[in-house]
Image (cartoon, rainbow, N blue to C red):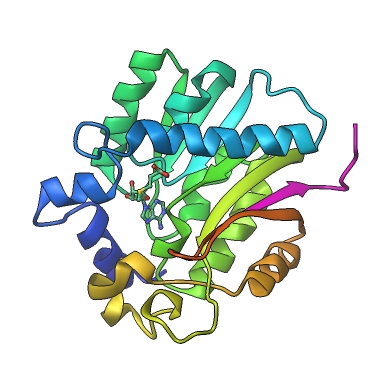
Amino acid sequence: MRKEDFEKVESVWANNEDSVYQNKISHHRKIWGGWDNWGQHNLSEIKRCFSFLNRELASMSIVEWGVGGGANMGALSFCSQNYIGIDISPSSLVASTEIAKEYVVPFTPVLIGANPEEDLLSYFDSADLFVSTAVFQHFPSKEYTFEVLKIVYNLLKTGGVGLIQIRYDNRDGSKKSRTIEGIEEYQEKYMTATSFTLEKFWEELKRVSLQPLYISNIVKQNQYANFIFTKGEFQDE
Ligand SMILES: C[S@@+](CC[C@H](N)C(=O)[O-])C[C@H]1O[C@@H](n2cnc3c(N)ncnc32)[C@H](O)[C@@H]1O
């Protein structure tokens, strides 16, 4: 991403003039009331995925893109051998580091910039589980999303599994469905900046050689959907 475009994204998540608001939209525990429920909700989705795969939810290496206030890490602490939390916001990495201390999770916070691949090379091939919830809809474009998905492929180990939540486009022309036309719209529309139809996001995963397994938790009201995928041939163990 161009540096000047990235600065617009940072002005919402990292350098927001209203730091209380920034922490709230970033799901920091002290200020966001949904913290506990959200982590537990996503844990139940991950449990369902492991049960589908006939795998134990045992100690493993987890990578989260947009770790925010660490709600998922708190819920996954019992099975986190180590947890890599990626974010563009230093204050989210501070907030999630506090959660890691409290939940005794070996945690590596990773601050990424405009070109995340450079920052993440040393974490390639490290994730048994990749998680990203409430983040992909905040990406500034479909092109950036594609670049991130290529990195997700590289972060996962062969046989690793992933959960990505998106806000889907149901082609009704509603505000939530429309991807912004350019970065100049980002500051106003970051909440629903990028969306895909369910079919298109499935194809995007395949385009980077990830194997989509199923879509779950399709919530019509806010147009959320979870994609579950793996890297490599799916083997029913
Ligand atoms: C709504 S919070 C979600 C936090 C957490 N994933 C959860 O589900 O509770 C969004 C987080 O993603 C981060 N974020 C926004 N854009 C990002 C990007 N392009 N790459 C990585 N993190 C990003 C924000 O700084 C914030 O911490």
208 vs 57: above or below: below
Residue at the far left: name it: 17
24 vs 54: above or below: below
Position of residue 144 measured from the top left corner of the image (x, y, whole percent): 49, 68
| The magenta segment | 227-237
Residue shown at 64% from the left, 18% from the top = 59
Name the quarter where the C terminus is drawn: top right
Residue 183: which quarter of the image?
bottom left
Residue shown at 43% from the left, 81% from the top = 178
58 vs 15: above or below: above
Residue 226 shows in the view: no
Position of residue 136 measured from the top left corner of the image (x, y, whole percent): 47, 59
Residue 146: which quarter of the image?
bottom right
Confirm whether the magenta stretch covers residue 233.
yes
Observer-nearest of 14 and 57:
57
Determine whether, in the image, residue 163 is placed left or right of residue 31: right
Name the quarter where the N terminus is drawn: bottom left
Observer-nearest of 73 and 111:
73
Position of residue 95 measured from the top left corner of the image (x, y, whole percent): 27, 32
